[in-house]
Image (tube, rainbow, N blue to C red):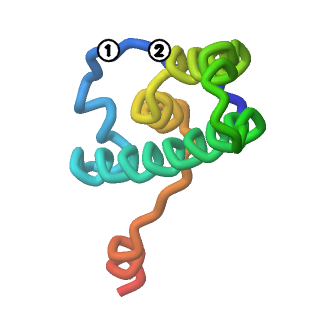
Amino acid sequence: MDYKKTNAPTNTITRNLMELCEDTGNIYETVAIIGKRANQIGVEMKNDLSKKLQEFASYNDNLEEVFENREQIEISRYYEKLPKPTLIATQEYIEGKVYYRNPAKEKEKLQ
């Protein structure tokens, strides 16, 4: 996932709860959907960051290298400036990019 291309805000903004729950009809279900997607995004971001920082891992105890590794610091700053996973997930939900389904509701419709 390319986090640069997301148009999610970097700061928290107020949302209208009634607009968020229009699709599901239940605010708790909407929050659960956004929460699960935010967890997925958070795990993906953590894995990406770990892979990038693993390239700079050194297995010797040289203190000078620890303090002078500018690339590692820049990567960490980049990830700190990104929007939080919950903000990205909320923006994806509003834009209709999140697929979700409720098996209980599908079962009720069939009966």
- Residue 91 percent coordinates (x, y): 48, 28
- Among the 4 quarters of the image, the one containing residue 49: top right
Q: In this picture, is 41 found above or below 77?
A: below
Residue for badge 2: 9
- Residue 29 percent coordinates (x, y): 28, 53
Question: Badge 2 local density, few (<14 within 10 Å), some, or many (20+)?
Answer: few
Q: In this picture, is 106 found above or below 62?
A: below
| Direction bottom: furthest residue | 111
Q: Could you tell me if the residues under marks 2 and 1 are in contact, i.e. CB atoms within 8 Å?
A: yes
Residue name at image x 53 percent, y 34 percent: 92
In the image, 65 versus 71, the foreground residue is 65
Secondary structure under tag 1 reads loop
- Residue 12 percent coordinates (x, y): 33, 16
Specify the amino acid type for callout 1.
Ile
| Residue 85 in the figure: left or right of residue 18 | right
Q: CA distance from mark 2 to mark 1?
A: 8 Å
**Residue 13: mark:** 1
Question: Badge 1 local density, few (<14 within 10 Å), some, or many (20+)?
Answer: few
- Residue 4 shows in the view: no
- Residue 13 percent coordinates (x, y): 32, 14
Residue name at image x 58 percent, y 22 percent: 76
